[in-house]
Image (cartoon, helix red, strand yellow):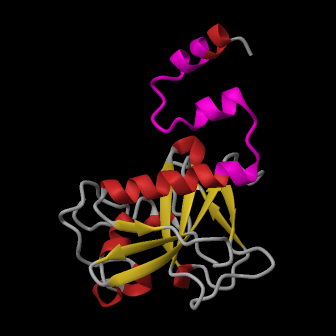
């Protein structure tokens, strides 16, 4: 691609917040690259919320990122969806052939790329489920995981502070600059 066409492409996408559309417009990243881009975005979001992050070396662990809050380390698996499933929702695999278990991860961070939305889902909310469906574009969605939309506060509180099914009864993260869908103080 001649450089002037590339510059025009970049200029036309300057307003894009994530930069993912620029990458998709320039090349055709495979699933691995798109997953890596979502992982990088997850790490950046955690850092902006003052959550410490560590990236494990290698790919042998069932989690992608460690997130530290105070003295607790959460094991987070990051997944992304780029196109809606035929059901109208976005499909994320809950581990494929080998389902995630409580001793593997603590949270699944599901990135719905077209909407730039994150779902921070505790492992207990999807145990033994090979597929998870998210419906962010449905008005007043009552989807199973909707209460975990932008639930970054779950990464910043101890399990005893959370409510039933890990949904806080009282906001535990007044210092966070955003409120999750489950926040009672919206």
Instruction: Check the picture and name the quadrant holding the N terminus.
Output: top right
Locate residue 162 relative to residue 132 in the image: left or right.
left
Membership of 133 in magenta stretch: no
**Residue 107 placed where, x, y %?**
51, 75
**Residue 160 placed where, x, y %?**
31, 90
**Residue 52 placed where, x, y %?**
34, 67
Residue drawn 24% across and 54% down?
177
Residue drawn 64% across and 16% down?
6
| Residue 182 in view of the camera | no
| Residue 152 in view of the camera | yes
Residue drawn 32% across and 53% down?
48
Q: Quadrant of residue 148?
A: bottom left
Residue drawn 35% across and 87% down?
159
Q: Main secondary structure of the magenta part?
A: helix
Locate residue 54 relative to residue 52 in the image: left or right.
right
Tell me the magenta residue range.
7-34
Q: Quadrant of residue 132?
A: bottom right
Locate residue 35 relative to residue 170 in the image: left or right.
right
Looking at the picture, does residue 50 appear above or below residue 103?
above
Looking at the picture, does residue 98 appear above or below residue 67?
below
Looking at the picture, does residue 81 appear above or below residue 126?
above
**Residue 118 placed where, x, y %?**
49, 56
Q: Nearer the viewer, residue 44 or 108?
A: 44
């Amino acid at each position: 691609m001649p450089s002037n066409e590339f510059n025009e492409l970049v200029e036309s996408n300057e307003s894009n917040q994530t930069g993912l559309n620029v990458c998709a417009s320039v090349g055709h990243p495979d699933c691995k690259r798109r997953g890596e881009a979502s992982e990088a975005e997850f790490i950046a979001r955690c850092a902006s919320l003052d959550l410490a992050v560590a990236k494990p070396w290698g790919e042998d662990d069932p989690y992608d990122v460690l997130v530290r809050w105070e003295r607790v380390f959460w094991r987070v698996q990051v997944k992304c969806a780029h196109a809606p499933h035929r059901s109208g929702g976005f499909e994320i695999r809950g581990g494929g052939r080998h389902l995630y278990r409580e001793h593997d991860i603590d949270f699944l961070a599901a990135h719905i790329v077209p909407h730039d939305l994150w779902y921070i889902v505790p492992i207990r909310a999807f145990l033994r489920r090979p597929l998870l469906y998210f419906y962010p574009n449905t008005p007043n969605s009552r989807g199973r995981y909707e209460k975990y939309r932008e639930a970054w506060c779950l990464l910043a509180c101890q399990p005893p502070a959370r409510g039933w099914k890990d949904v806080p009864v009282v906001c535990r993260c007044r210092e966070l600059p955003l409120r999750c869908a489950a926040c009672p103080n919206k």
